[in-house]
Image (cartoon, grey):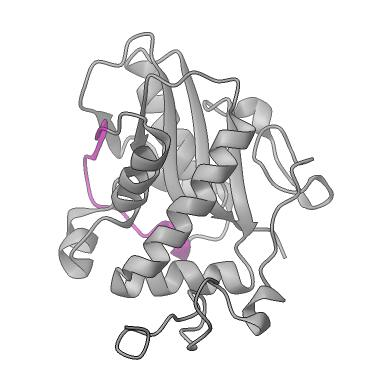
Amino acid sequence: MSFLFPNKCVACGEIIEDGVSVCENCRKTLYRIDRQCCKYCGRDIPLCGCLGKNNYFFRNVSVFRYDGSAGKIVKRYKMGKITQISVYICKELSMLISEAYRDVYFDCMTFVPVSRVKKLFRGFDHAELIAKGVSEILGLENTALLKRRFSFKPQKSLHTKEKRQKNIYGKFRAMKNVKGKTILLIDDVMTTGSTLNECARVLKAAGAADIFCATFAATYKK
């Protein structure tokens, strides 16, 4: 079975021994974020440039720094919907959520939806699949609460938080009644936090009590 379906590193695709997910070389650049991190954005405090007091979400936690192997994992996952990578991301994110939010009761969880164009191009919504996997592990209700209202310029093409905030504002709408609910919002990567914040703003405007976020990785300013 291993000969027909060999175990591969989730970051580089190299064939590796069974029972591990990341090869030795990629583990060297897989930077797990210390749990003594910023209480707002979830980044390591020495590297945090957060203005979290202005966020609509209460807190974010991220498993890894995006630079290095974590970035490779996300890119390979988005390119190919590789089941092994999806399982790895969901497992790591679920463990973090269980630890960081162990004292929080969530009414439900949701995700940041991709555009219709991206979903048609890739054939799947990567954040939706991550949320589905995490919900199965943690036993939380997962439901689509947000919809993109219009297409807009890709956030990754904008290099300042101000431009990202302006670009994303008003581009989502809430689809269901969330009055009084405490919601866990899932995405793959947090860059400036503008997309998470806009989604949280919309959910809060729809009546949500609190929004907590969780992402597989977080970027850092160079």
Is residue 165 among what the camera can see? no
Quarter-of-image position of residue 198: top left
Query: In the picture provided, is 44 more to the left or to the right than 191?
Result: right
How many numbered marks have been drawn onto this rendered protein structure? 0
For the record, the magenta segment spans 143-157
Residue ID at (79%, 53%):
47
Residue toward you, 88 or 187: 88
> Could you tell me what secondary structure mostly forms the magenta stretch?
loop
Looking at the image, the residue that sits furthest to the top is: 180
Quarter-of-image position of residue 119: bottom left
Q: Quadrant of the C terminus?
A: bottom right
Query: In the picture provided, is 26 more to the left or to the right than 166?
Result: right
Residue ID at (53%, 53%):
92
Q: Check the image and report above or below for 52 versus 3.
A: above
Q: Is residue 148 magenta?
A: yes
Residue ID at (44%, 30%):
184
The x and y percentages for residue 126 are 32, 57
Is residue 200 among what the camera can see? yes
Query: In the picture provided, is 37 more to the left or to the right than 54?
Result: right
Q: Check the image and report above or below for 52 versus 70.
A: above
Q: Quadrant of the N terminus?
A: bottom left
Residue toward you, 15 or 130: 15
The x and y percentages for residue 144 are 24, 35
The x and y percentages for residue 176 are 21, 21
Query: In the picture provided, is 71 more to the left or to the right than 168?
Result: right
Q: Check the image and report above or below for 203 versus 17.
A: above
The x and y percentages for residue 178 are 30, 16
